[in-house]
């Protein structure tokens, strides 16, 4: 007979909290990264301090550390107002008049250089305080009295905020090319380390790079230990090897990334996805997903907390510098660091080893590396992370002209949001050119209809066409020296056989153009660019913007950027020998 099963205890154990794990009071100090948030030290009445601390940690405590630090700084602005005005003596003093005084105080604040605070800088502290007071009124009834908030004290704060500067297409390409150069160099560095390790095996760490890397893997789990450990007995051979092969920072590059080595991967992912800086910095290791029936493409998925929905874009798996290849490479490069990451950082894609252990990548760190190392090393002008997303979307819209396609790439819910991203001087100029072309086509249609309706005019036009010599058909040379098989063939969109091609002004803009990389072709492109630039000073601005500016923009931003620096340099030597171009009018 089977033994009787022992009865299960269904009473949950009550574990006493560890000392110091749960604050005894809501205003007890807490550390968020390197910031200590201590409500108990705020110069506020005790009941106000406790109520604000309770609302802050219960309402904002689930936010990211970066957001908590920003909200804490905004709340301290209200503390400054309370100290300077001396109007707050308890919770009973928090009413409509006090909030109006706070708004008036914000409106007279100035920066250190004398400039007034922007509308966003004034709205931030007020909105933070209002959220806390609304939470108290909703979740702690009776703590506050009847409270009415001022109606829209900072109207049009989004409209009046300064627009983020858009980067030109050539600057975006230069940033992406710089990232690809750094990634190629890092791949060669890791390939060399693997080759050295395969050839050396287990030997003296002081005599071979491969033996040194193997010793670090075998003795320290693949992580270079701190100097206090290396200074002990038994580690002298590893110390000599580290000194011989460039020091700790250089040897670490063969094993796992440092902070500055992750920047090119992060910027390449940011440009390819046209994503927001912080969500891309918080990519997880499982961000790649397969696409059914498409073996050569994968979906990159990330979370945007503000949108409350998953963002996604598909990319080719065969391209060496697109996100699928970069993500796989980062996962392989950081697998030794992942067991040493703490908390939620172990699930993050972008990990690095810093001075204080293994950390996750952040937008703040990216700004610092861009400012101190990346732009200076590659000779790039300074740029902000916030400008990359609108710049990429604007460039995509200028290239495609399809606003709904850009909306799908940006993962926007409303088309109006996409419009705000792509608005700019270059897009407006392109719109004017397109509207002018439509108007010309419409006027031409009306003129043809009028001439067909009047028999007398029709007979006159037919007689004129019979007396006019027909334009010769066959090969021709455009005004910028490019050969055309037949400019009257009606190849360009909107033209018919017998009509002069609309792209004949500059055949390099023709969709059927084939431009080779030989020195003569590139020299003609350079001559056309210089000729268009010189014409801008003497042609009427309206005609220049409508006729010649689009040609120069295509030539500078799309065509010449595809050639290497060596090809452009050799072509520049051939440019003086070319025949002069006709004067533009």
Image (tube, helix red, strand yellow):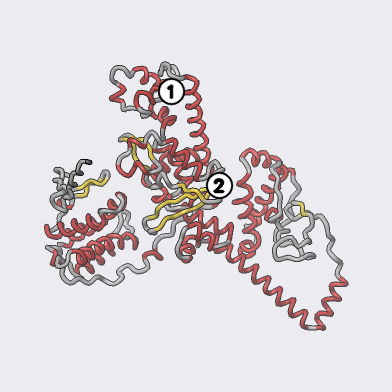
Residue that protrudes farthest toward the front in the picture: 1
Assign a secondary structure to mark 2: strand
Assign a secondary structure to mark 1: loop
Q: Relative to 297, does residue 537 appear above or below in the rendering?
A: below
Image point (50%, 25%), residue name:
195
Using residue 146 as the reference point, say whether residue 452 is left or right of it. right
- Location of residue 220 (image quadrant): top left
* Number of numbered discs: 2
Using residue 211 as the reference point, say whether residue 535 is left or right of it. right
Image point (65%, 40%), residue name:
567
Q: Where is mark 1, residue-wise?
A: 245
Mark 1 surroundings within 10 Å by alpha-carbon count, few (fewer than 14), some (14 through 19), many (20 or more): some
Residue 505 shows which numbered tag?
A: none
- Location of residue 351 (image quadrant): top left
Mark 2 surroundings within 10 Å by alpha-carbon count, few (fewer than 14), some (14 through 19), many (20 or more): few
Query: Is 368 in front, or is 40?
Result: 40
Residue 295 shows which numbered tag?
A: 2
- Looking at the rendered image, the disc whose residue lies closer to the viewer, 2 or 1, is 2
Query: Is 37 in front, or is 582?
Result: 37
Q: Quick check: can you spot residue 171?
A: no
Image point (46%, 61%), residue name:
412
Q: Earlier in the sequence, mark 2 or mark 1?
A: 1
Q: Relative to 463, does residue 470 appear above or below in the rendering?
A: above
Q: Position of residue 390 (x, y in %)?
A: 47, 56
Alpha carbon distance from label 2 to label 1: 42 Å
Tag 2 and tag 1, C-beta contact below 8 Å: no
Q: Quick check: can you spot residue 5?
A: yes
Q: Position of residue 87 (x, y in %)?
A: 15, 64
Image point (63%, 47%), residue name:
560
Q: Relative to 262, does residue 559 appear above or below in the rendering?
A: below
């Amino acid at each position: 007979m089977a033994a009787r099963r022992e009865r299960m205890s269904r009473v949950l154990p009550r574990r006493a909290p560890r000392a110091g794990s749960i604050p005894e009071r809501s205003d007890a100090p807490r550390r968020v990264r390197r910031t200590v948030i201590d409500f108990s030290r705020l110069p506020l009445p005790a009941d106000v301090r406790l109520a604000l601390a309770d609302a802050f940690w219960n309402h904002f405590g689930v936010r990211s550390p970066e957001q908590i630090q920003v909200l804490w700084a905004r709340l301290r602005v209200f503390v400054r107002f309370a100290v300077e005005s001396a109007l707050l003596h308890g919770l009973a003093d928090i009413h409509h008049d006090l909030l109006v005084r706070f708004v008036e105080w914000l409106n007279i604040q100035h920066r250190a250089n004398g400039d007034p605070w922007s509308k966003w800088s004034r709205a931030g502290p007020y909105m933070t305080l209002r959220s806390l007071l609304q939470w108290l009124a909703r979740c702690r009834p009776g703590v506050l009295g009847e409270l009415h908030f001022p109606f829209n004290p900072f109207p049009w704060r989004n409209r009046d905020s300064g627009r983020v500067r858009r980067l030109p297409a050539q600057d975006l390409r230069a940033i992406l090319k710089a990232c690809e150069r750094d990634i190629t160099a890092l791949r060669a560095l890791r390939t060399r380390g693997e080759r050295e390790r395969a050839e050396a095996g287990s030997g003296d760490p002081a005599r071979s790079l491969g033996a040194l890397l193997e010793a670090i893997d075998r003795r320290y789990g693949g992580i270079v230990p701190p100097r206090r450990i290396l200074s002990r007995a038994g580690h002298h051979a590893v110390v000599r090897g580290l000194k011989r092969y460039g020091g700790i920072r250089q040897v670490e590059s063969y094993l796992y990334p440092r902070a500055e080595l992750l920047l090119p991967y992060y910027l390449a992912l940011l440009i390819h996805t046209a994503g927001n800086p912080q969500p891309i910095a918080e990519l997880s290791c499982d961000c790649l997903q397969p696409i059914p029936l498409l073996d050569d493409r994968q979906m990159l998925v990330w979370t945007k907390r503000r949108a409350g929905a998953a963002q996604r874009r598909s990319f080719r798996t065969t391209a060496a510098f697109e996100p699928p290849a970069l993500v796989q490479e980062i996962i392989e490069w950081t697998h030794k660091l992942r067991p040493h990451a703490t908390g939620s950082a172990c699930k993050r894609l972008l990990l690095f080893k810093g001075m204080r252990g293994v950390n996750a990548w952040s937008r703040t760190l990216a700004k610092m590396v861009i400012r101190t190392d990346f732009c200076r090393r590659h000779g790039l002008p300074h740029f902000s992370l916030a400008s990359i997303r609108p710049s990429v979307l604007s460039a995509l819209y200028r290239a495609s002209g399809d606003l709904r396609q850009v909306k799908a790439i940006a993962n926007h819910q409303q088309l109006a949001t996409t419009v705000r991203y792509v608005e700019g001087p270059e897009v407006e100029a392109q719109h004017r050119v397109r509207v002018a072309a439509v108007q010309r086509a419409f006027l031409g249609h009306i003129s043809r209809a009028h001439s067909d309706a009047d028999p007398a005019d029709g007979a006159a036009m037919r007689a004129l066409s019979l007396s006019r010599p027909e334009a010769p058909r066959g090969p021709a040379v455009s005004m910028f020296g490019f050969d055309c098989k037949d400019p009257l063939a009606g190849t360009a969109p909107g033209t018919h056989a017998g009509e002069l091609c609309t792209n004949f002004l500059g055949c390099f803009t023709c969709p059927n153009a084939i431009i080779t990389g030989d020195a003569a072709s590139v020299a003609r492109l350079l001559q056309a660019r210089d000729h268009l630039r010189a014409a801008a000073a003497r042609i009427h601005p309206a005609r220049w913007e409508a006729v010649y500016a689009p040609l120069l923009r295509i030539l500078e931003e799309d065509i010449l950027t595809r050639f290497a620096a060596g090809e452009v340099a050799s072509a520049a030597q051939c440019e003086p020998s070319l025949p002069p171009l006709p004067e533009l009018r």
